[in-house]
Image (cartoon, rainbow, N blue to C red):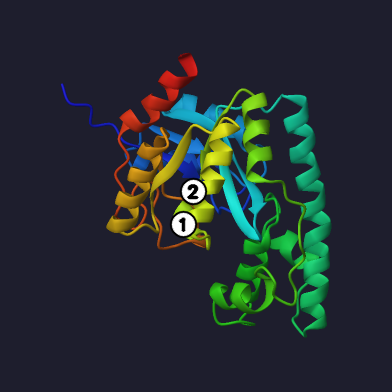
Amino acid sequence: MTDTRVVDMHVHSNASDGTFAPFALLAEAKKAGLSAMALTDHDTMDGIAEAAAAAEELGIELVPGVEFSTEYKDCEIHVLGYYLSEEYPRLRAKLEEFRDFRSTRNVRMVERLAEEGFSITMKDLTKRAPDSVLTRAHIARFLCETGQVPDIKTVFSEYIGEHCRCYIERPKISPVEAVVLIREAGGLAVLAHPVLYSLSDEDLRQMILEMKDAGMCGMEAVYSENSPEDETRFRQMADSYGLLVSGGSDFHGTNKPDIKLGTGKDNLHIPYSSLQAFKDLRQA
C-alpha cells in the first residue's frame, strides 16, 4: 500500500521569529494534513515542550529541533538539528548564551532606530508580543504596522539587515562547530536551504565536505525558495556526498505570508519517507 503521509521538516514558532505559538502551530499542521513536523526555531528550543504536548494531543509526530545561525567565509549559514537533547549541558549553555545576547542586541538596535528618527521602544515591542522571544522580525513588523516604513523588506534592506546602519552583529559559531554540538547532543545535523547562500559552488562544496567530516548527515534540498532546477541540483549534490535529503517550508506564519505550512509556495511535497530515512539513521 502506498504511503501518502507528508511532513514538514523546517518550521518556526513564536519561540523565535514565527507568529504561531507552538500549540497553535501544531493545530495548523493538523489542518494542513501533516503527519509529522519538525519545530526548528532559531537558536532556541524553548517551544519544544509545548509543541510536544500539542503533538501528543493532536496525534502528530513531532521532531524536536533547532536552527543554528553560523558563519562561513563572511556568509551566514544555517544548520538544522533534529532529535537533539535540549538537556545536554553544552547545548543548553550555548542556547542560553544566544538568548542572553539577543536581548541586549534588540535593545541596541532599537536605540539605533530611534536615533534614525523612528518612534520605537522596547516597551512598544514587548506590549505587542508579550509572550514571544523578540527578534528582528518583530522590530520590522512593528515599524510596518505603525506606518513608519512601507514593508518588512525595506526594514531589513535599509536598516536592520546584515551590514545595515542599525544592525548589531551577533556572536556566531562556524557550521562545523554547530554540527559537532548537534552530534554531541545526540542529534542529526542538516545543512539548511543552500539556495540562499552567496557562496561560489567551490566554497559551498568545500563547506559541505567540512560539515560532513564533522558528522553532518543531510541537506535541505527541498525548500520553498527553490526553483525546480535548484531542487534537482541540490538533490544531486546531496547524493554525490552521501547525504540524506531533507525538506521544509521554513514556515514563519504571517512573518512570511507567502509560505504555507507543508507546501511552501505550493511547490513542496515532502513524503514521510524523507523523515523515515533520518529515523532509520538514528537507529543504525
What number is the disc on residue 201? 1
In the structure shown, which secondary structural element does the residue marked by tag 2 occupy?
helix
Residue at (58%, 78%) from the top-left corner? 154
The type of residue carrying mark 1 is: Asp
Residue 122 at what x, y percent from top left? 79, 65
Q: Residues within 10 Å of mark 1 (few under 14, many from 20)?
A: few
Q: Are marks 1 and 2 in contact (CB under 8 Å)?
A: yes
What secondary structure is marked by label 1?
helix
Q: Can you say which quadrant of the picture contains the N terminus?
A: top left
Q: Residue 169's quadrant in the figure?
A: bottom right
Amino acid residing under circle 2: Arg
In this view of the protein, which residue sits in the foreground, 193 or 87? 193
Name which residue lies at 83% across and 72% down: 111
Residue 152 in the image: x percent, y percent?
A: 56, 72
Q: Image check: 276 left or right of 161?
A: left
Please state the total of marks drawn on the protein image: 2
